[in-house]
Image (spheres, rainbow, N blue to C red):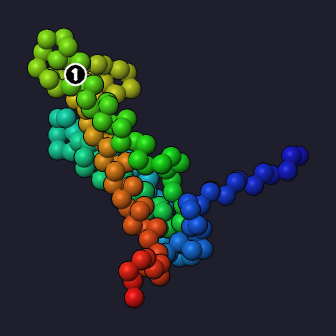
Amino acid sequence: MSPRRKKPAPVPLTGDSPTTAPLGNDPILRSVSRAAFALVLLFAFLLLWRGHNAPGGGFIAGLMTVGALILHRMATGTSALHVDPLRLVPWGLALAFLTGLVPYLLGRPFLKSAYGYLTTPLTGEFEWASALLFDFGVYLVVVGGSLAIAYALIDVDPQERVEGDE
């Protein structure tokens, strides 16, 4: 029998640890946040997927994802996102811009969406649209920008003194 390996602990962000997280020692929050995190992300991806045909889209899906990621950070003291959130912003801007540029280069109006239908045995018939790529670019910009702002506010130390404080 091989010995069981321990799962490595998540790496805390700049000085944070589960014991210094605002609510990191609350067992109820930690257990409930796992299920809430998964459900909110699932709903966010549904809004992203259906956003070009129904209410939703990249913006609201991004905000819901940010809410789930902040809940995770509050409950555990660590980030579930393993990259700097600001790195997502240029990728999202590039994707949204290229989604509009391609139709323009093909002689159509800027941001003109193409669409069609696919049928698979698993999902049946569903519509695809190039607007989903634009929505995904918006999603990346919203997640990256909002998380960068939220993390900057979370990392503020209210006891820190700056020049000019008396």
Q: Which residue ends up furthest to the top in the rendered image?
A: 106
Residue at the location (70% across, 54% down)?
8
Q: Amino acid at mark 1?
A: Leu
Query: Could you say which quadrant of the image residue 49 lies in?
Result: top left
Total marks shown come to 1
- Quadrant containing the C terminus is bottom left
Question: Which residue has dot 1 on it?
Answer: 101
Residue 42 image offset from top left, x and y in percent: 38, 47
Query: In this rendering, does residue 39 appear at all?
Result: no
Q: Which residue ends up furthest to the bottom in the rendered image?
A: 166
Q: Is residue 147 left or right of residue 31?
A: left
Q: Tell which of 75 and 163 is nearer to you.
A: 163
Residue 112 image offset from top left, x and y in percent: 14, 23
Residue 22 image offset from top left, x and y in percent: 49, 75
Q: Tell which of 37 and 136 is nearer to you.
A: 136
Residue at the location (30% across, 48% down)?
142
Residue at the location (25% across, 46% down)?
59
Query: In this rendering, does residue 117 appear at all?
Result: yes
Q: Which residue ends up furthest to the front in the rendered image?
A: 164
Q: Secondary structure at mark 1?
A: helix
Q: Tell which of 48 and 150 is nearer to you.
A: 150
Q: Is residue 128 left or right of residue 123?
A: left
Residue 116 image offset from top left, x and y in percent: 21, 18
Is residue 129 positioned above or below 67 on the image? Answer: above
